[in-house]
Image (tube, helix red, strand yellow):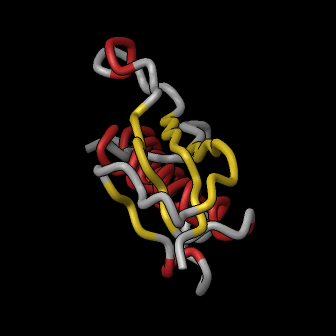
Amino acid sequence: MSIKKTLFISAALSMTLFLNGCSSSDYQATSAGRQVQFIDTKPAETCQFIGKAEGRRSTFFSGLKTHSELIRDAATDLMNKAAAMGGNVIYNAQDASLQYVSDIAPTDAVMVGEVFSCK
């Protein structure tokens, strides 16, 4: 293998590892975010609707992540935002990404949901 080819492969691998390393730390659940639950049945009448929230995962520094991995990060972002709003339940969460485009080219992953506070 030529030196140019070896240098190119080394640079490409280094950049991939760098981008993956930069991307993972921002998408960790906070202690409050870990307390938030996703539900698929309408919350009880005693739950208070707080508002809608959106979790997002940019593809710019995502490295070689699949859409499933990106949407998982967006869900974590949504949980953190719901907790910051004072909620502990997310109802009707949906993948609002441009799914048909993301199968061809990476797009930002977006998850939306309704935030409730249930005691």
Would you identify the image quadrant in which residue 44 lies? bottom left
Of 3 and 40, nearer the camera is 40
Would you identify the image quadrant in which residue 88 lies? bottom right
The C terminus is located in which quarter? bottom right
Of 28 and 17, nearer the camera is 28
The residue lying furthest to the bottom in this view is 31
The residue lying furthest to the right in this view is 85
In x, y percent, where is residue 110? 52, 36
The residue positioned 55% from the left and 54% from the top of the image is 19
Q: Total label count?
A: 0
In x, y percent, where is residue 111? 49, 40
The N terminus is located in which quarter? top left
The residue positioned 41% from the left and 68% from the top of the image is 37
In x, y percent, where is residue 51? 68, 46
The residue positioned 40% from the left and 34% from the top of the image is 95
The residue positioned 63% from the left and 52% from the top of the image is 49
In x, y percent, where is residue 15? 53, 51
| Vertical order, 90 against 111 (above or below) | below
| Vertical order, 93 against 86 (above or below) | above
In screen coordinates, is 26 left or right of 112? right
Of 53 and 50, nearer the camera is 50
| Vertical order, 8 against 37 (above or below) | above
Of 64 and 115, nearer the camera is 115
